[in-house]
Amino acid sequence: MSLLDIFRRRASDPESEEFRVRGFRVVVENTRADIATSTVVARLDEALGLIERYQPWRLAHMRRDLAQFWIVRYPCRGAYFPQSRTCMTELTFLARTDITAAPVAASILHEGMHARAHQMCTGTDARDPAREERLCRHAELDFGLALPPELGAPVIERARTSLELTDEDVAPAIDWAEAQRRQDAVDRAATNQSNSRTR
């Protein structure tokens, strides 16, 4: 199963809600009873607010390059789907309370850079995944450096660590079927834990 297959399967799910956040269409598919949809939408708004405040030109690019945000349970924290110009931001990542909105904003900005790169490439351009990943990580680093130090520190650390990786490691091949199996196991455990608390 490829990333695109997962997207197509999930995109046809009728269990979704639609919102407008800072001018963006936002589709939320919340399959986790232990996560409030209002919480993830508020965190998305907070993250976009950080981008708007500290690097407004990046938000302006996203407004041109993206058609929508898609919040869904997914085996990675973010992805860009060029066919629909969709930025996916993962449901449980948005729901985390152990981090600030800055890492969330950096992830969104990262996917926005993939959108920007896609918009700038022609159909004949060869894609270099490692180079594109590094462009996205440099954008994260620039964003982290623009933030107040207490917000920017984890963003800067993650970006710098990623930029030191080899080409193979900065843009690794992912077994999406295995990633989906692992995510499903985590969700089953969370559901079982939630059910045992309500008994």
Image: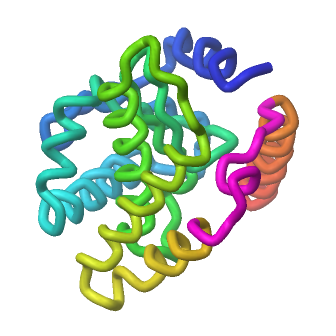
Camera sees residue 110: yes
Q: Is residue 85 above or below residue 128?
A: above
Is residue 123 or residue 187 the one in the foreground?
Answer: 123
Q: Residue at x 78, y 32 (%)?
A: 176
Q: Is residue 116 above or below residue 185?
A: above
Q: Position of residue 180 (x, y in %)?
A: 78, 35
Is residue 27 or residue 107 the one in the foreground?
Answer: 107
Residue 42 relative to residue 79: left or right: left
Q: Residue at x 30, y 68 (%)?
A: 143
Residue 168 falls within the magenta-colored stretch: yes
* Magenta stretch, residue numbers: 163-176
| Quadrant into which the N terminus falls | top right
Q: Position of residue 130 (x, y in %)?
A: 60, 47
Is residue 186 or residue 75 the one in the foreground?
Answer: 75
Q: Quadrant of residue 2?
A: top right
| Quadrant into which the C terminus falls | bottom right
Q: Is residue 99 above or below residue 79?
A: below
Residue 128 falls within the magenta-colored stretch: no
